[in-house]
Amino acid sequence: MHRLDGHIKDIEPRILAICKYAPEQEEASLQQSMSAYGWVLLDSWVAWRTLRYLLKNTFIEERVDEKWFSTPSSYTASQMKAVLGIEDKTIAYIKATTDKSFKELIDNTIQKKRNAAAHFTKKMGINGNDYKNIKLYFDILSKVFLLYETGSFIEDICKILKPKGYEDFKIIFPECEAIDLGDNIKKAFVDSIETYCKCSSFVFVFTNGLNKCSISFNKSGCEVERKDDEDKTVNKAVVLDDNLREYVFFENKGYYLDIQKFVSKVISGLGLE
């Protein structure tokens, strides 16, 4: 696990709890207080997710965590676009689902609401029913972060597999035609944002000679399969980490540490060592 996973996982159930229970509270001041805390949590969560992506596949020692990661630093929309490499299709998706531009969502809504909550200013009013927007933005940004994390992970898988003779990299979403990833692998994956955000699984396929290989990503875990040139299954296995846990990418975790080890386990599961 990445050193920052704990920060992110601790925040997420708190955001969801506020969104679930805030409407049941009758006191207006309590509703506002919960919404205010929700904005602070959402801003922190965005910062931690951005930082984790920036440091993906980088091991961080605990002593470093003590000094440098006591509190997250907020990111502007421009900084987030630079760190994640956010594409126009993603910005269009955010606009369509939130009715806000990316800059308006990050800089003029989440961060301003967070600052208003932290400093109790009335310049940016916080309402008791803000939990509805907090939940909406959390859900949308969860999909966006996961899309870019997973896209980068697949791109790095391809970089390792290509020199080993693997080719024809494609992505298949449920009930959709295969998408050829071509040379710009991450962009080709990210451009499928509308399809990706509607599903909870996809399959990454590639070939090695006459072998047809696949890695299935779903909410239960990660499974590999190899078929021969007659389309008969030769090998099939669940991919596990060293602690015998499945890789679950859809739990807001699209990029795992030690990608070399992951690819090694995939090749082993395919029976192609």
Image (cartoon, grey):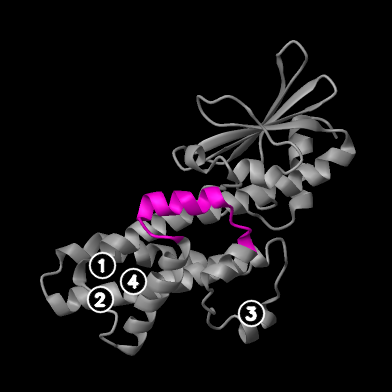
Alpha carbon of mark 1 to alpha carbon of mark 3: how far? Answer: 32 Å
Q: Look at the image and say whether residue 25 sits in the magenta stretch.
A: no
Circle 2/circle 1 CB separation < 8 Å: yes
Left or right relative to 141: residue 163: right
- Under mark 1, the amino acid is Asp
First in sequence: mark 3 or mark 2? 3
Circle 1/circle 4 CB separation < 8 Å: yes
The residue identified by callout 2 is 126
Q: Quadrant of residue 50?
A: bottom right
- Under mark 2, the amino acid is Ile
Q: Where does the magenta region start and end?
A: 83-101
Mark in front: 2 vs 4: 2
- Under mark 4, the amino acid is Gly
First in sequence: mark 1 or mark 3? 3
Most prominent secondary structure in the magenta stretch?
helix
Mark in front: 3 vs 2: 2
